[in-house]
Each structure stands twice: as C-alpha cells, then as structure tokens.
Amino acid sequence: MPKEHNTHPAPAPGRVHLVGAGPGDPELITLRGMRVLSAADAVVHDFMVHPDLLAQARKDAQIFCVGKHAGRHTIEQDSINVFGRGGEEALALAAAGIPFDVVPGVTSAVAVPANAGIPVTHRGMARAFHVITGHNPPEGQAAPPLPGPDEGTLVFLMGLRRLEAITAQLLNRGWPANTPAAVVSQGTLPEQQTVVGIVSDIAAKAVAQNLPSPAILLVGEVVSLRAQLARHDGSSPFFTSSPEKREGT
Amino acid sequence: MPKEHNTHPAPAPGRVHLVGAGPGDPELITLRGMRVLSAADAVVHDFMVHPDLLAQARKDAQIFCVGKHAGRHTIEQDSINVFGRGGEEALALAAAGIPFDVVPGVTSAVAVPANAGIPVTHRGMARAFHVITGHNPPEGQAAPPLPGPDEGTLVFLMGLRRLEAITAQLLNRGWPANTPAAVVSQGTLPEQQTVVGIVSDIAAKAVAQNLPSPAILLVGEVVSLRAQLARHDGSSPFFTSSPEKREGT
C-alpha cells in the first residue's frame, strides 16, 4: 500500500466518505477507498477494520473506534461489515446537511466464497444468489422467509452459534438434507478455514472444528465445485497465502 | 492509479490471476487487482473492462480481448461482469493443472445500488437481498422462482428489454404494484442514470428515458431511501462525479 501519503491531495473540507474496507484482507480495499483513507483528517472505524488499513491513515489524522458505540453493541460483530450501517450513516449525514459520498467495497458475501473456491453463481447450477443475515431479528420483527431449494445459492452472514437453527429451518423449508453446504471462517484472512459438508451435518462439523467468527454459511450445488477447484493438498487455489500476498503493497 | 509499474514485482511464472475489475469506475478495482494487472505478462479481458484499467498494464504486456469469443457471444454483455465466468475459468485452469488464484472484486449488484443512493439492506426494512440474472435462461432450463414480497430486496442484472417481463412476473408473484423500484444504468460511471418508480410503472419509465445497458433493476422498500439521500438538485450525493474523482490516481 502507498506510503507516500503526501502525494494524495486532501479531499474538500468537511466531506465524509463512507468507505467499504473489504472482507478482511487489507489488500482488497479499492484504490479510491485507499486514496480517501490516506488523505483523511479523521478516520472513524468499527472493530472489523484491519490494522494494516488504519496504519495507512495520515500520521496526524484523528482515529476514532466506534465499534462498541451505544446502539451498536447489540449487533453481532461478524455482521457489521456486510449488513453494515452505511445506509443509516448516510441518512444521518443527509439530515445534518453534511456532504458525503459512498466508496463501495468488496462484499464478503461474494468475495469470501470465491476465495474459498466456491463461486456463488455458476452456469447451469445457480442463476441467483440470496444474501441473508442469519442473526436473530430484532424484537418484534419476523425473520424473512427463506428461499426454496430451486431458487439458487444461499449465503448466510451470521454467528456460528446460529448454524444449528438455520440448517433446521432449511430442512423445514424443503432443502434436501444432502444439499452441499460449507462454512467459511475468517474469509480472505490468513486464518481462513473452510469446512464442507451437507445441510444435515454442516452445523455439527463446524462446531467440531471450533471455528472462530466471523463466518459465512453457503448452501447449494455450487459448493460441490470446490472439490474440483481445491489443490491436491486440500487447500483452495483461490486462497493466496503465499508471500506474494504482501508484495508491492 | 500507480504509474510506476516497475515497482511491482512480477508474480511467479505461469500463474493466472482471475481478477474482478469492479462495477465500472476504474478506481473501484482493488489494490491487489491493480498490483497483478500492472505486473502481468499478458492480460485477457472481456469488453466490460474500462480502458483506463487496460492502460495500467505493462507496455510490453500482451493484451487479448475475448469479449466475443466463441461460447460467450450468446451471453448478454451486461451480465458478464457480475454473473461472470470466474467459476468456469477456474475449473478449466484446474483441469489443465495451471496454478491460479482469484482476486475478488467489487460486485455491481451491491455497489451500483449504493452509488445510486440505495442501500440493498437497511435495518427494519430489509434483512436479505437477492441477486438474480434477469436474462432468459438457456434453452431447456427453467428460470428460478422469484422471492416473494416479504423476503427482502431484489437485484436483477439484465438487459433493459427484459424489464417488462420481469415486472409482470413480480406482480404475478404477489409483489404489490406500488412497491418502490429503480433502474440504474451504467452504474458508477460518469454516465450513470437512475430512474425511480414502482413495480407497475418502472418498465415504461425506463423505456421512456431510453436508458442504455448495462442496467440493474432494484425492487423493495429500500428504494424509497433514495429520496432522503438525494441532493436538492435531484442527483445522488453517493455519486462522486466531481473532479476529485480522478485526483491522486
């Protein structure tokens, strides 16, 4: 990542950039995201942001961590980076008359599966994918109904302790017990782990591995592609953990 | 974008990087995507890639456009960058024993709505989003059933001439005629245009505007947030078309 912060002109005064910082790997921020981050007078971040990214802020920039700010602590950490608060923050800024823009980032819901050797769509296999928060809905709200087994790939962003409940719901919804399923923990980070199974056993397998959060549950035929895309040693060729990863950054 | 190509070490010989180049705006490629692009001996691209990105390839790199390659010409151009062929290319590389990795990119399905002032999820409004190819399915394949009106936000990636058929299907599926809907054409590019309406009139409105492809259809309550997020002149504050856009690149 660029070290020469001074080559980046400062943005216009008083503008807020809402930046999607990516799914975990700090090199998956966008060029524009890095540009505004490294030029900012102040950086407000949650606790999902990689420290290597914060290190790119100007040395004199004010850094605020709002990860446990009031109103946020009821949201599980592993959902924040995808089902984030971008919309709410944008509404607050608009209401306050503060100029802002959004710098879209790489979405965990698609990038984490790809990095684990699982494309969420595939010709002849899935023409749609569905991204669902697997957390319990806030009090008084119903969880949305789940798509059925002929509707495409499911991507759940969730805490691992919800796995058992979600897979039970899928079986109730008519998903065959032997539908391929995978859990990807800490996707795109060096610590990434993937557990593959079927709807009826993936929860037990993930628990047995004691996977850490954040995690993504994938359900659908596309999960079966991973077997063909995995290296002979069982690791995925998608996951670049070689030293090349940090070169040139 | 970096001009100093020689500071990027070349990757290991004979490795293929499958790079998601982003939704349109060339500054929305990731740092890693730019690194491997600017170091590559050869660049194979489709016709959705922005010329400013190709200009970052090494001057001695071989450039191949495969946008109209056999087998691809039946796919409508505007679906390739999202419902891309990443999975198929990965399978072909694995079968041929060629080392490869995937560099995930910014997904149009989420970034284009955000850039038009429409978050695909929003607390209390949508806990899920569904990304669906709006193209006619290949011969012999049925299109997947559509999610219902209580399931979250719908994102269709499609040719504009399919709008009428898709909205008719939504009404059949039980979506209320007055559900907010929007079409975003050429999202994240300077030419981005957004037309807002409801399920029953969005097709006619988009046709009246004669919007060019590629386009995304959004359906759901979250579309209503755009009104609060739009500037007084009607443009979205999300869309950074100011001169700052290219500064420092």
Image (tube, coloured by chain):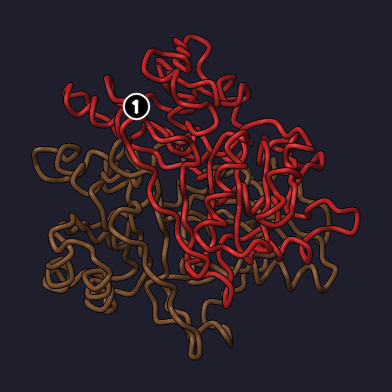
Chain colours: A brown, B red
Query: Looking at this view, is A43 or A221 the one in front?
Result: A221
Residue B229: horizontal and vertical position, in percent? 76, 63
Residue at the front extreme, as displayed: B172
The amino acid on which the numbered mark 1 sits, given as a three-letter code, is Pro
Q: Is residue A188 visible to us here?
A: no
Which element carries disc 1, helix, strand or loop? loop
The image shows residue B34 at horizontal and vertical percentages of 50, 33
On screen, A123 above or below B98? below
Whether residue A86 is situated above or below residue B185 in the rendered picture: below
Q: Which residue is situated farthest in the right direction here? A: B233
Which quadrant is the N terminus of chain B positioned in?
Answer: top right
Label 1 CA crowd tier, 10 Å (few <14, some 14–19, many 20+): some
* Residue visible at 40% across and 16% down in the picture: B41
Residue A23 falls in image quadrant: bottom left
The quadrant of the rendering that contains the C terminus of chain B is top right
* Closer to the camera in the image, A201 or A36: A201
- The relative height of residue A5 versus residue A64 in the rendered view (above or below) is above
The image position of residue A168, as x and y in percent, is 22, 75
Residue A12 as seen in the image, left or right of residue A84:
right
